[in-house]
Amino acid sequence: MAPGLEADPCSKCEEMLQPYLDRDLTDAERAEAEVHLDGCSYCRKRYRFEAELRRFVRQAVSEEMPPDLKRKLADLRTPLY
Amino acid sequence: MGETTPEAEPRKLAEEARDRVRFEEEALELADQVYRVARRLVSTREEAEDLMQETYSRAFRAWRSFQPGTNLRAWLLRILTNLNIDRGRRQQRSPDMQPLEEGDYFLYNKLEEAGRESNVEQERVDERLSQDDVVSALSEVPHDFRDVILLVDIGDFSYADAAQILEIPIGTVMSRLHRGRRILKSQLAEQAVNA
């Protein structure tokens, strides 16, 4: 077996990891997910990796708006009389 | 009954002008956040600028159709994504059908191998992938999947907001997000191997 992660050793992980990372769980579901993470080293490892990868992707693809574009957008406003 | 006094009409116009100005100011304050998503929906900065100007032009014309108290950022993104579709700006290939389950773990394992000495996840990812790698990998994700990644991961929208913006069910948002992230990871794995 290759080092790292094996193929799907924890079905619970697939079910809750995505909405947990996206903060799209109810309070009760979130609490349940955290209990699971506390007791499952596979999910914990996967969670850290996914969270870090998501942060990195977000940072890498975020580009600031060119300053003159904001002025151009402001110029599109309806003129005041 | 229902008649307006001579004073009422100017007052109504003044109130409307005030509401419009407030709407325009609030929309402009959100421009940076809208741009971050727009920039990755299209290939170039110039296209993103055009799309932003068309979006704001349409939004300012249609300001009366915005319901105060609802999510203005989602409303703007809905205009933007529709304009992007209407103008056929997407140059996409069909979804890649490679075995994504393998790609998913492959990336983890490649990074794991690269950073075995380190316990810090951040170092592993940062060391193996450049900003250009990520931008390039994201651009390879087919648009239906990329749209939801951009809205949820870059735009910070909830599943419900993303569903409303793209006019698709929440379940579809979740499944596209799941599959889209796997495609992205598969693309990143290729970049990590070639690094």
Image (cartoon, rainbow, N blue to C red):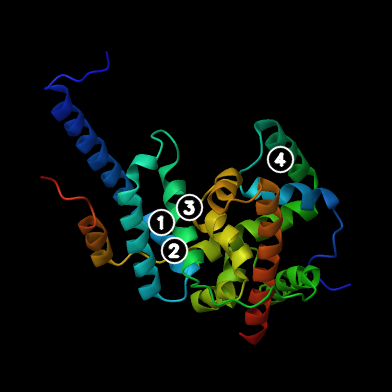
Q: Label 2: which residue?
A: B38
Measure the C-alpha gap from mark 4 to mark 3.
34 Å
Disc 4 and disc 2 on one polypeptide chain:
no
Q: Label 1: which residue?
A: B34
Foreground tag (3 vs 1): 3
Disc 1 residue type (three-letter): Val
Q: Residue at x 66, y 48 (%)?
A: B169
Foreground tag (4 vs 3): 3
Disc 1 and disc 2 on one polypeptide chain:
yes
Among all residues in the image, which is located at the extreme top? B1
Measure the C-alpha gap from mark 1 to mark 2.
6 Å
Locate residue B162, reporting x and y percent: 56, 50
Q: Residue at x 55, y 71 (%)?
A: B126
Q: Secondary structure at mark 4?
A: helix
Disc 4 residue type (three-letter): Glu
Measure the C-alpha gap from mark 4 to mark 1.
32 Å
Measure the C-alpha gap from mark 3 to mark 1.
10 Å
Please give the chain letter of the residue carrying mark 2.
Answer: B
Locate residue B25, reporting x and y percent: 26, 45
Image quadrant containing the C terminus of chain B: bottom right
Q: Which mark is residue B194?
A: none
Q: Label 3: which residue?
A: B78
Q: Label 4: which residue?
A: A34
Q: Secondary structure at mark 3?
A: helix
Disc 3 residue type (three-letter): Arg
Query: How many badges with numbers are in the image?
Result: 4
The answer to whether residue B120 of the structure is visible from this angle is no
Foreground tag (4 vs 2): 2
Please give the chain letter of the residue carrying mark 1.
Answer: B
Label 2 neighbourhood size at 10 Å, few (<14), some (14-19), many (20+)?
many
Foreground tag (3 vs 2): 3
